[in-house]
Amino acid sequence: MATLKTQFEKAILGQKALVYVLCPEETRVLPMLEQVASENSLKFETWSCVSGLSKTGKPEKTRDPAEAIRTITEDGSKSIYAFQDLSEYLDNPEVRRALREFNYGKTAGTGKFLFMISPELKLPDNLREEIHLIDVPPPSDDEIAEELRRIRSKYPNTKVPETYNDEIKIALKGLSMAGIDSILHRIFKSGKTEKEPIFNEIFDEKEVIIKKTGYLEFVPPRALVSNIGGLGNLKDWLVKREKVFSKEAIDAGIMPPKGLLIMGVSGCGKSLAVKAISALWKMPLFRLDMNLVFSGIYGSPEATFHKALQTVGAVAPVVLWIDEIENALGLEEEGGLTISSHIFSSFLTWLQEKPPLIFVAATANKIHALPAEIIRKGRFDQVFFVDLPDEAERREIFTIYLKQFCDNLDQFDLKMLSIMTNGWNGAEIAQVISAARTDAHYENRPFAHGDITLNINNTVPLSTTMEQQIKGIRNWAMSRATPASKNARILRF
Ligand SMILES: Nc1ncnc2c1ncn2[C@@H]1O[C@H](COP(=O)(O)OP(=O)(O)OP(=O)(O)O)[C@@H](O)[C@H]1O
Ligand SMILES: [Mg+2]
């Protein structure tokens, strides 16, 4: 990715008179712009609605944005003008007209540049053509390394081992420079030497950033791969990639995977598998709530979605979970055809170009609604199909849940239980054990095999009521996805 400085230089070389700098950190952008101005023999001047223009004209006269733009249009010197929060005024026709005159007027192309710096993208459609957009990336590896060196040097007696440096740099990736500064000061001051509390400090900061958005939810790393029954191929895939986001792997030039699409029958562990990635790979997991994105509470769905992807990019390395992707991305079926939304197209483009340290985990169950583009090779590293568990897998699931409540499993006939639950999904097995425990608890006695069999006999599994749909899902997935289970696929009913 081009550095911030090269992006500014490119805009100047390309004689882009109007530049929109999307960045929440003015303190990072302004000094860099000033440096670029000086290296290109340009005057550097700032504007804000509080102070007006810093050099040209009287401040009190140039607080009005349209007036300030008219003033710099008349100004004869070659300059970079850094306007702070001008985006707040772009719905004012007078400001838009003044910007057009700056762009096309007689001083156009004479080495004058108006940079609008804003934390949010608020570009009116009728100015899109004229304005060159720079989406400022979070601090680069070199910038982070320099900041770490600088702040560490202020704490000569710190006990934080130098050997943590490389991992700290990776963990800090994606945070703003101000965030990085405050964390580093906290870490060096705290006297902590253990790895875990130091890294938790960093992850907590990332969590706070995400929480502020409202539509991204932090999912705590509680699920373990060892608590997933069956799904052997999927588990192997995850375990094999356990270290791909580590410093060693990145240094060795291993490309981290882009993402995983897990589709299939309801209640068979798709969400559970995504949750397990976080603990296994030691990366924070955030679920994007697309219902909230579409609700309009946070602005237009397109803009909110864009912002969500940016926010996630800002806290990478991270796992981004998009649940029920077929609903989430506004895909609709109409007369057997899938109609893609704008959001869906921008998601596909983003998926191909996204920052490498975001891993996307998508889950789907109405898989007929998924258009071919999403499954095409190159978008996701792997597409897994999750089916109902077979007998051996059901036995594994029973074992996982029973072990949580009983020390001695000899009292349970696991073979019998797994035969009795032919056609059941994992969620139903978990549910039947929970119901059996409730029954026993109600009668004030330890729960036993009979409680489970009784509840099994009283349950109608989903596969009975949805036999046709499940067959349909299987036929569709057969040629399009890798079975998540190792013992695929001689099945069932
Ligand atoms: N393979 C499994 N191993 C262990 N537990 C399972 C398994 N499958 C399902 N479960 C249990 O069922 C619960 C629900 O499963 P999960 O939410 O992962 O299903 P899903 O495939 O995402 O379903 P949906 O399509 O309805 O979202 C899990 O939290 C877990 O308790
Ligand atoms: Mg799910």
Image: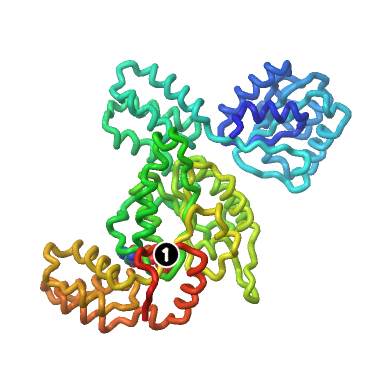
Q: Secondary structure at mark 1?
A: strand
Q: Quadrant of the N terminus?
A: top right
Query: Left or right: 368 with respect to 200?
Result: right
State the residue at coordinates (47%, 27%): 144
State the residue at coordinates (82%, 39%): 97
Q: Is mark 1 within 8 Å of ligand 1?
A: no
State the residue at coordinates (45%, 41%): 317
Instruction: List x then y, in percent, for residue 306.
Output: 59, 49
Amino acid type, callout 1: Pro
Instruction: List x then y, in percent, for residue 195.
Output: 29, 33
Residue 419 appears in the figure: yes
Determine which residue is flagged by label 1.
483
Q: Residues within 10 Å of mark 1 (few under 14, many from 20)?
A: many
**In the figure, 415 relative to 227: above or below?**
below
State the residue at coordinates (42%, 20%): 149
Q: Nearer the viewer, residue 306 or 420?
A: 420
Q: Nearer the viewer, residue 67 or 99?
A: 99
Instruction: List x then y, in percent, for residue 445.
Output: 11, 73
Q: Nearer the viewer, residue 259 or 61?
A: 259
**Quadrant of the image occupied by residue 452:** bottom left
Residue 85 appears in the figure: no
**In the figure, 340 relative to 132: above or below?**
below
